[in-house]
Amino acid sequence: LAVAGVQTLHPYQPGKPIDELARELGLNEADIVKLASNENPLGPGPKALAAVEQAIADITLYPDGFGFDLKKALCEKLGVEMNQITLGNGSSDILDFITRVFVNDGDNVVVSQHAFAIYGIVAAMVGAECIQVPAVDYGHDLDAMAAAINERTRVVFVTNPNNPTGTWVGRDALVSFLNKVPDNVLVLLDEAYFEYVHEADYPDGISLLANYPNLVVTRTFSKAYGLAALRVGYSVSSPELADLLNRVRPPFNVNSAALAAAAAALSDDEYVASSIAVNDAGMKQLEQAFNAMSLYFIPSVGNFIAFRVPQGFDAAAVYQGLLQKGVIVRPVANYDMPGFLRVSIGTETENKAFIDALTAVLS
Ligand code: PMP
C-alpha cells in the first residue's frame, strides 16, 4: 500500500526504556548511564523547569499556534524578525517540512558521507534520491558537495558541526560554498550543536542569511538547553522561505509546555554557560582517556565524540559489552563508520563510569 519512497524506509529503532533495561541487567535504574543521544547531562535549567510547571497547570486550551512569546524571545536573542522563524516539534520537524516544500519525487538532495541520518529519511519520504558525497577526514568536503549539485538537486544539507563525527566547517569554506550553490537550490544549515562550539572561525549561520536568500538555518532546544523530551526546535530564514515552511507546519505542532520552557531557557544564560563548561571538561576527560588507551577518536566540537574500537574488536560487541555494564552508547554502523562508536559527553561521574566500563570490556 505504501508509496515507493516509504517502502525503502524502516521504522526508527529506539533504545529500550531505561527501567526495562535495568530490570533485564539486574541493575538499579539509577545505575544506568545513558550516553547515547547527545542530551544535556545536567537536565533542564531551573527557569525552564519552573515554566513547564506553570504551563502544565492548565492544559485545557490548545497551545499558542503562532508561538508568539517564544518567537519574540528568539528575535531578541538572535536579532531577527518574527516572520523569519518557523517553529518545529524538534528541529527534525523542520527537516521534514524542507523536503515536503522543496523536493519532488525524482529530485535529489546532496549530503555528506557520515552526515546525520534524518536527511536521507526525509528525502526518501518524498521519493527523492540522496546523493552522498565522500567525506574528507570524516568531515564535509564542501567543494565536492557543490560539484555534486545537478539539475535535479533541490536541497543541500550541511551539518555544522556534524553528528556523529563532531567535525565542523569554517566561515571561509562555508561562504565559498554558498557562493557556488545556484540560487534555486536550497541550503539547509543544521546547527543543532551551535552552542557548544568555541572555534574562532566557526560561522554563525544566521549572520549569513542576509546575503544568501536560499539559506535556512535550524537549531534546537534538545541539546545545550536540555529540553529534548519536550521536542522544540526552529529555523531562521528569509521571510519568504519561512512563509513556505509555515504552510506545511501542522497547527499546534509545538505544545504549550515546550513553548514556555524554550522561551524561559533562552533567558537562562547562566545555565547554558554551566552546561557548556561541563561539556568542555567532559570532552577533555574522554580525550585523555582515549589517548591513555591508545584509541583513535575524531576530534569533536559537539557534545559527543566518535571513537574507534581497537583492532581485533568488533564495535557491535563492544557496544553490547558496555550495555551489559549498564552504559549505553550509540552504534554508528549505519553511518558508514566501521569500528566506531559514538558516546555523548556526560557528567564527570558518568564519563568515569563509561571509561571504567570500556576499560573492562577491552581488557
Ligand atoms: N540535527 C542533528 C545534527 C542532530 O544530531 C539532531 C538530534 N540528534 C537533530 C538535528 C534533531 O534534533 P531535535 O529534533 O531534537 O531538535
Image (cartoon, grey):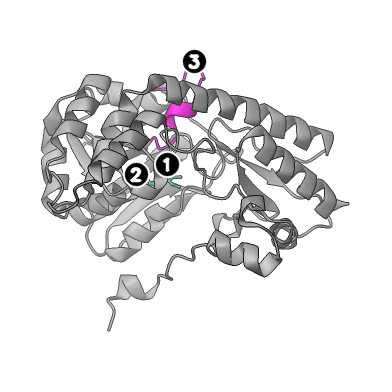
Q: In front here: 69 or 244?
A: 69
Mark 2–mark 3 CB contact (< 8 Å): no
The answer to whether residue 330 is above or below residue 170 is below
- Label 3 CB sits under 8 Å from any ligand 1 atom: no
Q: Main secondary structure of the magenta part?
A: loop
Q: Residues within 10 Å of mark 1 (few under 14, many from 20)?
A: many
Disc 2 residue type? Val
Would residue 61 be seen by someone viewing this image from the given angle? yes
- Residues rendered magenta in the picture: 191-203
Would residue 238 be seen by someone viewing this image from the given angle? no
Tell which circle, 3 or 1, labels the residue nearer the N-terminal end: 1
Mark 3–mark 1 CB contact (< 8 Å): no
Q: Residues within 10 Å of mark 2 (few under 14, many from 20)?
A: many
Which residue lies at the image location 30% right of the left edge and 41% below the top edge? 53
Which residue lies at the image location 50% right of the left edge and 43% below the top edge? 163
Callout 3: helix, strand or loop? loop
Q: Which residue was labeled with disc 2?
A: 156
Q: Which residue was labeled with disc 3?
A: 200
Question: Which of the 4 image quarters holds residue 335?
Answer: bottom right
Residue 267 in the image: x percent, y percent? 31, 23
Tell which circle, 2 or 1, labels the residue nearer the N-terminal end: 1
Q: Is residue 202 magenta?
A: yes
- Identify the disc placed on residue 145: 1
Q: Is residue 208 magenta?
A: no
Callout 2: helix, strand or loop? strand
Give the Cα separation between the discs numbered 2 and 3. 25 Å
Which residue lies at the image location 23% right of the left edge and 23% below the top edge? 211
Residue 57 in the image: x percent, y percent? 23, 46
Give the Cα separation between the discs numbered 2 and 1. 8 Å
Left or right of 227 on screen, residue 281:
right
